Amino acid sequence: MSSNTSNERLADESTTETDGTPNDAIIETAISVDRGASRATGRTETIVRAEGLDVYYGDDQALDDVTIEIPEHRVTAMIGPSGCGKSTFLRSINRMNDRISAARVDGDLYFREKNVYDDDVDPVALRRTIGQVFQSPNPFPKSIYDNVAYGLRVQGKADEVDLDAAVERALRGAALWDEVEDQLDESGLDLSGGQQQRLCIARAIATDPEVILMDEPTSALDPVAASKIEDLIDELVDDYTVIIVTHNMQQAARISDKTAVFLTGGELVEFDDTATIFEDPDDDRVEDYITGKFG
Amino acid sequence: MSTKRETDFLEDVDRSREKLLNRVFYGTLVVASLFGLVMLILLIADVVWEAYQAFVTFDIDLGNFLTATSSSRAERAGFGASILASLWLMALTAVLAFFIAVGCAIYLVEYAPENRVTRLIEANLANLAGVPSIVYGLLVLALIVNDAGLGSVILAGAIALALLIVPIIIVASIESIRAVPSSVRDGSYAMGATKWQTIRQVVLPQAMPGILTGTILALARAIGETAPLIMVGTMLHATRYPSGPLSSFSAMPTQIYNWTYQADRMFNGLAALGIVALLVFLVGMYALAGYLRKRYETDGGSISNV
């Protein structure tokens, strides 16, 4: 399927989905999907595409024949029970799975029509285009400034740009500037957990990647800090593509435009507009999972 | 009636035997812990007392002792040349051992494939650290002093001491590097850093305090080593100041050793003073190691606080 037809399909589905009445909602809790609906109406390119992707850790299969097309400038959520392979999928996009010696990848994963598992792809170069934010905030034991400047420095861009301005821009982008502008020289580890996670987001966007992968970025945070991150994700998507793994279904419904549901065995069961997934999923297992019958 | 029965288990219970056992065991542990401390205090007190006695009896000039070279005449003998020789040894040993050991530790933790050979090397590091120091002295005597014709110079002594402490520093460095959480490494790789950039800019800065502490403690062991230096061959009396790595020498422990079997009682007194000087150096090095560790703990640079 060419990316063009897939975009039309995306657009079609979003139209039908906005027509759906709230009564169809299968979740009783008030879940707003308005953001996703409004944003999904515009046409958009596919930025990450997997075709028949299998990932093995030794003899264990973590992903089973995953095929998915992830749109640009959208928030795509990956949900599913523990061990379903959603984090594995995330790590296979920027080839962080290469770090695990037992990991093996079959199938194709394209970033802008370039198979990232081709022999001529340098994973270091790939990761300079695809940033990642981790489950637990992991700032470096350096100053706040050096944390944010780290990517520009290791990528050799520190001399080409105004580093001070780039650091400020990234910290503003991560909604952290106002809180830390007077303490840029202090250790990033002195910040609170929520601030640390926003520092990690600032670190990721400082190098202006195209995609930001987030692996349960709020699961180690309190609700207030988590809600700040969620607001931030909503703004980030204007400039970046966000792919987020989350255990929190309300969160997926709140912030994402598209939702992919993985179930045990590394199988991608359903991938559709978030509203459709939460209100009228095709697959009974998805409905069971979302309504809490298992998972 | 019923209340009486319910509180029976609180009264009329003879636990004196259990209490006695507890006390005996507790007492044994305290005595065992105190034993080491008491012996150390006795040792230091004895050395200091001997040194004081010698100081008074032979009317030793402390300035002369700290600055003069040794001599065959006890009244003129000093410790200065030996102190300088030990400082040279420490500096050369540190340079020789540090880079080899840290390089080896980085390789083993970050690069080496996880296979049998790697495990064999790591397991044998502990054995290497346990090899008697005189063996390293013999090795250097054969290979460096004689075969390579370097002679009995400070550099040869430093090579022997470096061989001795390299395994110790490797073990300490491996532990420090392993203690850097993998989440921080992942963070660096995900930013598009190369392996070397990650090691250089994230892993090593975080592991360095631990590596430095281990290095200083290993050097503190090396500064007191006598056997390998005797094997390498030192002067009986350090009669001149070492001028560089290729000077002949007698370091602090070997000079003390040589003084102790001189017939003149005053030499024995000088040896006691020399031991005090050596202890001062040791305490200084331990203090430096402790300071580094302390500073490292308080500035929150060690472990992510999440």
Image (tube, helix red, strand yellow):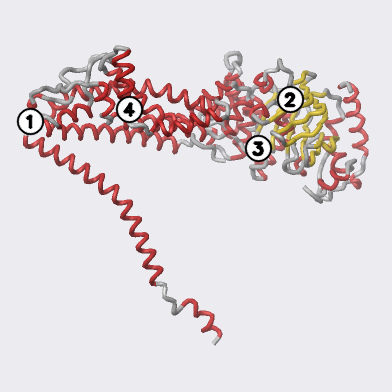
Residue furthest top as drawn: B149
Measure the alpha-carbon separation of dots 3 and 2.
22 Å
Residue shown at 10% from the left, 29% from the top: B61
Secondary structure at numbered mark 2: loop
Which mark, by number, is residue B135?
Answer: 4
Residue A135: assigned label:
3
Report x, y in % for residue B239: 15, 19
Residue B39, numbered label: none
Quadrant where the C terminus of chain B sits is top right
Foreground disc of the pair 2, 1:
1
Q: Do discs 4 and 3 share a chain?
A: no
Q: Which residue is mark 2?
A: A239
Q: Are marks 1 and 3 on the same chain?
A: no
Instruction: Give percent across and percent down for residue B33.
Output: 33, 51
Mark in front: 2 vs 4: 4
Judged by depth in the image, the label closer to the viewer, 4 or 3, is: 4
Task: Measure how far apart labels 2 and 4 are at the Cα level.
Answer: 66 Å
Using the image, name the chain to which the residue with label 2 belongs: A
Neighbourhood count class around disc 3 (C-alpha, 10 Å): few under 14, some 14–19, many 20 upward: some
Which corner quadrant of the image does residue A239 belong to?
top right
Residue A263: percent from left, percent from top: 79, 41
Is A141 left or right of A72, judged from the image as shown?
left
Q: Is residue A289 left or right of residue A103?
A: right
Task: Kindly identify which chain the residue marked by label 1 belongs to.
Answer: B
